[in-house]
Image (cartoon, helix red, strand yellow):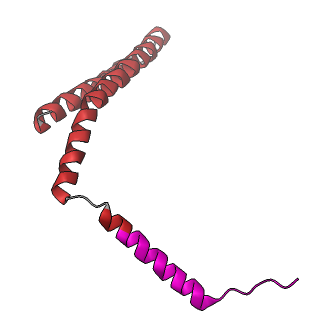
């Protein structure tokens, strides 16, 4: 049984027709640029509160982990306990401050 050969002329015509169809389809469902920007703005603002709460939760978990690490270093008599405590505390404060500043800066 002989396999049919691919006809490049038909394939090229099919590809051009497919591209034309996809461009017409995209154009038909395109929306106004301002409407798209406003919808994106609305969606990002609706997720911002959830993202802020997630940052607070991550800060709480990191704070607990840091407290355990600092406690272990303190009990072990490690001389750089104060430096580690300051680093962990600073990272947690940074997360809270960033969330607050972003809220006030963008008016969310």
Q: Is residue 85 above or below residue 10?
A: above
Residue at left offset 37%, top offset 66%:
25
Q: Is residue 1 above or below residue 57?
A: below
Q: Is residue 39 visible?
A: yes
Q: Is residue 80 visible?
A: no
Quick one: 105 or 81, which is closer to the camera?
105
Residue 51: x, y in percent?
30, 31
**Magenta segment main secondary structure:** helix
Quick one: 57 or 17, which is closer to the camera?
17
Q: Is residue 26 above or below residue 73?
A: below
Residue at left offset 35%, top offset 65%:
26
> Which image quarter holds the N terminus?
bottom right
Task: Indicate left or right for 56 with 79 as reference.
Answer: left
Q: Does the magenta portion include 20?
A: yes
Q: Residue 81's quadrant in the figure?
A: top left
Task: Indicate left or right for 92 with 17 as reference.
Answer: left
Residue at left offset 26%, top offset 40%:
43
Question: Which stretch is magenta?
Answer: 1-24
Q: Is residue 52 above or below residue 12?
A: above
Taking the view exactly as shown, the residue that stands out farthest to the bottom is 9
Q: Residue 79's quadrant in the figure?
A: top left
């Amino acid at each position: 049984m002989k396999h049919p050969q691919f006809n490049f002329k038909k394939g090229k015509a099919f590809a051009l027709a497919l591209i034309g169809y996809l461009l017409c389809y995209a154009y038909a469902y395109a929306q106004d640029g301002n409407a798209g920007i406003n919808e994106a703005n609305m969606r990002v603002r609706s997720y911002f509160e959830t993202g802020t709460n997630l940052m607070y939760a991550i800060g709480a978990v990191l704070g607990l982990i840091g407290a355990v690490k600092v406690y272990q270093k303190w009990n072990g008599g490690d001389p750089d306990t104060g430096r580690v405590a300051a680093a962990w505390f600073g990272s947690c404060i940074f997360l809270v401050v960033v969330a607050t500043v972003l809220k006030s800066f963008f008016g969310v």
